[in-house]
Structure formats: C-alpha cells, structure tokens
Image: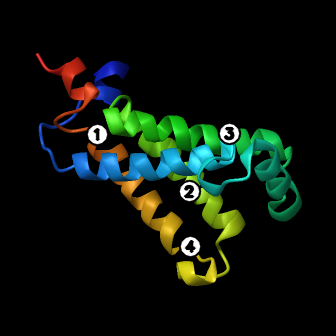
Amino acid sequence: MNIKEILLTTSNTAAFLPIRIGVGLVMIAHGAQKLFGWFGGYGLQGTGQFFAENLGLKPGVLMAAMAGGTEFIGGLLLIVGLLTRVAGISLAGTMAVGIITAHAGAFFASNNGMEYPLTLLLASLSVAIGGGGAFSVDRKLTSK
C-alpha cells in the first residue's frame, strides 16, 4: 500500500458527508475569527496576544496563525473531502491543544469547558479514521 492509498482510499458511504460539511463549516468560521477577525473574532494580533498572555502559547501570533490556519484550511478540505484523513487528524490535534490549554478546567461549554471542542475533536477523528466517503474528492481520485 502506497502513501496515496493510505491517505485517500475511502469507502463509498455517504455517512461522513454531514460530519464533513458540519465540522468543516464550524472550523472555517473559527479559523476566520482567529485569522481575519470575522464573525466577532479578534484577528491574528488579538488572538495572538490572548494565546501568549492567557494560554502561555508563545510566540502568540505564530501559534494563533497555526491554529487558525489549521482550522480554516482543514475545514475547507473537509467540506470538499480532499486529504480528509490529514485534515481530520490536524483538526483533532488542534482541538486537543485547545482542550488542554483553554478548556481543561470544566466539562460543560456553559462553564468554558471541553464539551464543545471535545465533540469537534471526536468528529474530526471519525473522518480521519473513515476517510471522506462518497461525494469526496478523495473518492474521485482513487476510484477506478
């Protein structure tokens, strides 16, 4: 099995489509908040300052760019189903860092807990395991 097969081969199920689209849209929005200040976000400088001063993630702007870029680009990749496994594992890792650094003190989202990022982590991990499924670019690239 070569690297292309490992990364792109997927089933022909449509079960992953709603997860890909839903998580992809959420992640694009969160990434856009960090990178561009859209949807009420603080942009790269503001998020970078928060990361450095409140979360200890330094250099803050670089860490914000990495998190926001992973969320934004990973979300786009999920929606189209391209490199779905890579996008899923990258997003799961980003959510794990978010849980550890910003949401470890509580479980429920109403208390700034890990409930929401954990759900995104698990959904991202699911598509990383399962692949893009039917209606994905991955499937198109590997079907014979």
- The amino acid type of the residue labelled 4 equals Met
Please rate how many residues cluster around mark 3, counting C-alpha atoms within 10 Å: few if below 14, some from 14 to 19, many from 20: some
In space, the residues marked 2 and 1 are separated at their CA atoms by 19 Å
Choose the circle earlier in sequence order: 1 or 4.
4
Residue 141 x, y percent position in the rendering = 24, 18
The residue where tag 2 is placed is: 95
In space, the residues marked 4 and 2 are separated at their CA atoms by 9 Å
In space, the residues marked 1 and 4 are separated at their CA atoms by 25 Å
Residue 78 x, y percent position in the rendering = 37, 39
Say which quarter of the image contains residue 99.
Answer: bottom right
Please rate how many residues cluster around mark 2, counting C-alpha atoms within 10 Å: few if below 14, some from 14 to 19, many from 20: many
The residue where tag 4 is placed is: 114
- The amino acid type of the residue labelled 1 equals Gly
> Mark 4 and 3 residues: CB-CB less than 8 Å, in contact?
no
22 with respect to 12 (left or right): right
Choose the circle earlier in sequence order: 2 or 1.
2
The structure residue drawn at horizontal position 21% and vertical position 34%, both measured from the top left corner, is 10
Please rate how many residues cluster around mark 4, counting C-alpha atoms within 10 Å: few if below 14, some from 14 to 19, many from 20: many
Q: Nearer the viewer, residue 28 or 107?
A: 28
In space, the residues marked 4 and 3 are separated at their CA atoms by 20 Å
89 with respect to 44 (left or right): left
Quadrant of the rendering where the C terminus is positioned: top left
141 with respect to 74 (left or right): left
The residue where tag 1 is placed is: 131
- The amino acid type of the residue labelled 3 equals Met
Residue 66 circle label: 3
Q: Secondary structure at mark 3?
A: helix
Choose the circle earlier in sequence order: 3 or 1.
3
The structure residue drawn at horizontal position 56% and vertical position 73%, both measured from the top left corner, is 114
